[in-house]
Amino acid sequence: MKTIGVAIIGCGGITLQNHLPGLALCPEARVVALCDNDAAVLQRASEQSGIKACFSDYKEAIHRDDVHAVIIATPNVLHGPIALAAVAAGKHVLCEKPIAMNLAEAVEMYRAAEAARVRHMTAFTYRFVPAFRYLLHLVQAGAIGQPYHFRVQRFQDWGTRAVGWRQVKKLASTGELGDMLSHRIDYAHALMGHIKTLVADLHRFHDVREGQVSDLEDWVAIIARFAAGGTGVMESSKVCTGRGESARSQDYCEVNGSEASLVYCMGQKPELQIGRRGQSTLEPLPVPKEFLVWPGSPRDPSRGDPLFAFRYDQNFEFIDAILNQRPCVPSFLDGARAQAVIDVTVQSANEKRWVEVPVVT
Ligand SMILES: NC(=O)c1ccc[n+]([C@@H]2O[C@H](COP(=O)([O-])OP(=O)(O)OC[C@H]3O[C@@H](n4cnc5c(N)ncnc54)[C@H](O)[C@@H]3O)[C@@H](O)[C@H]2O)c1
């Protein structure tokens, strides 16, 4: 069996929660190097994983001969430079979202990865939610008829708590928009296709979080028109008091079509809600067994917290795409398309007008 050696760059929250346990479920993957420029974070990850090859400089980790693939889980500002260095060294890359600081950088990453013929993947983790996968399947199979509306809400209560690099523009580029709404922009693309034009607004309620300056938005809203004819309304906020945090807070997605409406609301149960034409109430629609794990994933869907365990399928998808020399889903192209919407959202909010979204191919 071929073994894929992986280097993880950035060993903070998402590496501990997602990438290390996810890779541990992949028999063909072996984490061979860890990198973080914070010695305490690196030591914690090394102790938790038992991996001894630890580096503070990502270039050293990337260039090891036993590293075939790189996972980038640093603050956003480093995604582009690390991805380009990894691709130049011929390594496959799974990059956290948003993949770049702006569209030009995202497109450069995508083109470089394609030219180098390496696998490239954007960590739009919520694509791996079983209920979303079933929703996508039903929409693609025509179960809702002609899609009219797409609607998402991501509501969390962070109050005035500090959110580290996430509140600093030069490190993150955008706030709530890139952090939380980027996943739902990817949902919009998967379900409804290209967003032709949008109007948006951003707002920052807290200029200071726990004594640290914040120069990024806590709230974002987008009204979108899709090239295929449907409309979209997307809203995400860090200041929805009483809504809670993380995976347990409001994460809602609804599509309304000519024949039916489907609702996905992140929760413990793998189910959707369906409203059929002629009815006035929604009914539960359980997610069939074959959608509970990503095709081929060795994960046992009956184990672990369902709000978190689905995320491990993302690591399986990356490793499986490398082994089978096929494109990853979602790829850097999906990341660049979402980045186009992010850039246009900021432009629309600044200029207070509808703006066309460039097509990224
Ligand atoms: N896909 C998802 O669902 C999801 C969830 C959370 C975070 N993320 C993304 O993952 C990335 C990391 O987020 P996080 O929550 O883990 O942040 P974090 O702050 O917990 O971890 C980031 C780590 O990167 C390290 N780092 C900073 N500069 C570095 C450098 N030059 N070299 C090596 N390491 C460096 C930091 O020391 C820190 O430990 C972000 O892009 C974020 O948007 C994605």
Image (tube, rainbow, N blue to C red):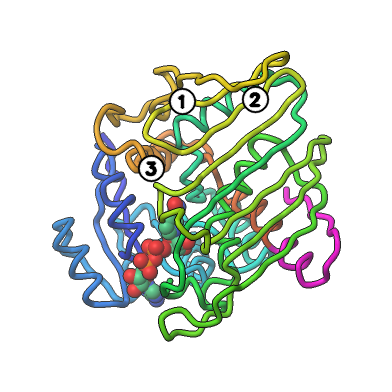
Q: Amino acid at mark 2?
A: Val
Counting other residues with Cα less than 10 Å from the Cα at mark 3, is it few (<14), some (14-19), or many (20 or more)? many
**Among the two numbered marks 1 and 3 on one chain, the one whose residue lies closer to the N terminus:** 1
Q: Amino acid at mark 3?
A: Arg
The stretch in magenta equals 343-361
Counting other residues with Cα less than 10 Å from the Cα at mark 2, is it few (<14), some (14-19), or many (20 or more)? many
Q: Quadrant of ligand 1?
A: bottom left
Residue 346 within the magenta-colored segment of the rendering: yes
- Residue with the most extreme top position: 278
Q: Is residue 359 visible?
A: yes
**Among the two numbered marks 3 and 2 on one chain, the one whose residue lies closer to the N terminus:** 2
User: Residue at (36%, 57%) from the top-left corner?
Assistant: 14
Tag shown at residue 31: none
Left or right, residue 283 beside residue 30: right
Marks 1 and 3: CB-CB under 8 Å?
Answer: no
Tag shown at residue 271: 1
Q: Viewer-nearest of labels 1 and 2?
A: 1
Q: Secondary structure at mark 3?
A: helix
Nearest to the observer: residue 230 or residue 158: 158
Image spot of residue 65 (x, y percent): 30, 59
Tag shown at residue 311: 3
Left or right, residue 60 beside residue 212: left
